[in-house]
Image (cartoon, grey):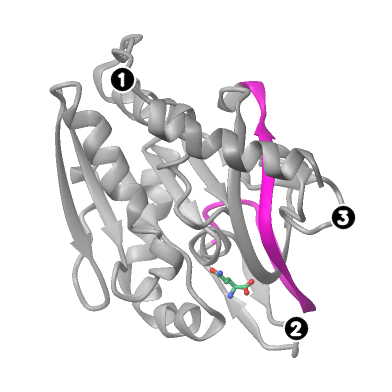
């Protein structure tokens, strides 16, 4: 078995070690003898989305998001939308998550029109939502506890066709109002969680990898268990800390 991963805009959307998610996916595949290739695709480089099984998009500030608009419109938006509809697997973090939606209106009234692959939009608030946080993914996304770190001004609101990735336990999540966190649409997993998400949430990582493998090979796949002592210690430490808040 093999998975081909495309890291979109690695030089622009790269906050808080988001790249660690790529390292984790690769490592957990390699430890099971599953080959993985990672290609990077940034501004000015053509994207042929049909070649890939997983797309990763990290976070970025408003400024970085704005400078991508022209490049997205020049071809990548169409490729990304098609890949989403073809049920390719995506992991998108914060600014990358917002970018998959319809638009982002910054807190000072400036509107960035994004690609609309997902029915959601984001409105900036003057007060940023910052801190360690915790949510539980919906059953559809594995029903597992996730610990992470969020830092965003944007409040994201989901449209009818998009489910949340999870329900908030501690922190703000999508907007600090409706207790939802992230988005799940087809095989897109989108979240506000930086820092890095997957190293300390190995159950979620495996869920995402399995989603991509099952789509590619068209059959249920059981991933061999790994020794996750360190990962689970990191996870549990944060879960305990946040439970006491
Ligand atoms: N610019 C976005 C916001 O502040 C995303 C920030 C981020 O990716 N951390 O809402």
Q: Position of residue 224 (x, y in %)?
A: 29, 13
- The residue that disc 2 covers is 107
In the image, which disc is placed on residue 177? 3
Q: Position of residue 199 (x, y in %)?
A: 40, 42
- For image coordinates 27% across by 77% down, the residue present is 43
Q: Earlier in the sequence, mark 1 or mark 3?
A: 3
Q: Residues within 10 Å of mark 1 (few under 14, many from 20)?
A: few
In the image, which disc is placed on residue 176? none
Q: Residues within 10 Å of mark 2 (few under 14, many from 20)?
A: some
Task: Give the CA separation, mark 2 to mark 3.
Answer: 17 Å
In the image, which disc is placed on residue 226? 1
Task: Please tell me whether mark 3 sits on a helix, a strand or a loop.
Answer: loop
Query: Could you tell whether 56 is left or right of 113 in the image?
Result: left
Task: Give the CA separation, mark 2 to mark 1.
Answer: 44 Å
Closest to the observer, 203 or 164? 203
Q: Earlier in the sequence, mark 2 or mark 1?
A: 2
Locate the N terminus by quadrant.
top left
First to last magenta residue range: 116-139
Task: Please tell me whether mark 1 sits on a helix, a strand or a loop.
Answer: loop
Q: Quadrant of ligand 1?
A: bottom right
Query: Could you tell whether 134 is left or right of 84 in the image?
Result: right
Q: Is residue 163 visible?
A: no
Q: Is residue 36 visible?
A: yes
Asked if residue 23 lies in the magenta stretch, the reply is no
């Amino acid at each position: 078995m093999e998975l081909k991963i495309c890291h979109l805009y690695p030089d622009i959307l790269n906050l808080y070690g988001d790249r660690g998610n790529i390292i984790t996916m690769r490592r957990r595949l390699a430890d099971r003898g599953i080959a993985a290739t990672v290609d990077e695709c940034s501004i000015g480089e053509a994207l042929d989305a049909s070649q890939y099984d997983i797309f990763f998009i990290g976070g970025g500030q408003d400024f970085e998001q704005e400078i991508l608009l022209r490049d997205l419109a020049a071809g990548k938006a169409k490729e990304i939308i098609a890949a989403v509809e073809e049920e390719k697997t995506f992991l998108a973090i914060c600014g990358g998550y917002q970018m998959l939606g319809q638009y982002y209106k910054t807190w000072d009234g400036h509107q960035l029109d994004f690609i609309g692959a997902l029915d959601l939009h984001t409105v900036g608030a003057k007060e940023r939502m910052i801190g360690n946080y915790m949510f539980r993914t919906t059953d559809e996304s594995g029903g597992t506890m996730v610990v992470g770190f969020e830092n965003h001004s944007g409040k994201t609101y989901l449209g009818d066709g998009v489910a949340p990735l999870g329900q908030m336990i501690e922190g703000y999540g999508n907007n600090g109002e409706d207790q939802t966190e992230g988005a799940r649409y087809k095989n897109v997993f989108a979240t506000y969680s930086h820092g890095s998400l997957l190293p300390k949430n190995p159950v979620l990582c495996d869920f995402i990898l399995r989603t991509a493998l099952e789509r590619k090979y068209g059959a249920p796949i059981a991933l061999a268990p790994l020794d996750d002592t360190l990962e689970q210690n990191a996870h549990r430490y944060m879960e305990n800390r946040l439970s006491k808040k």
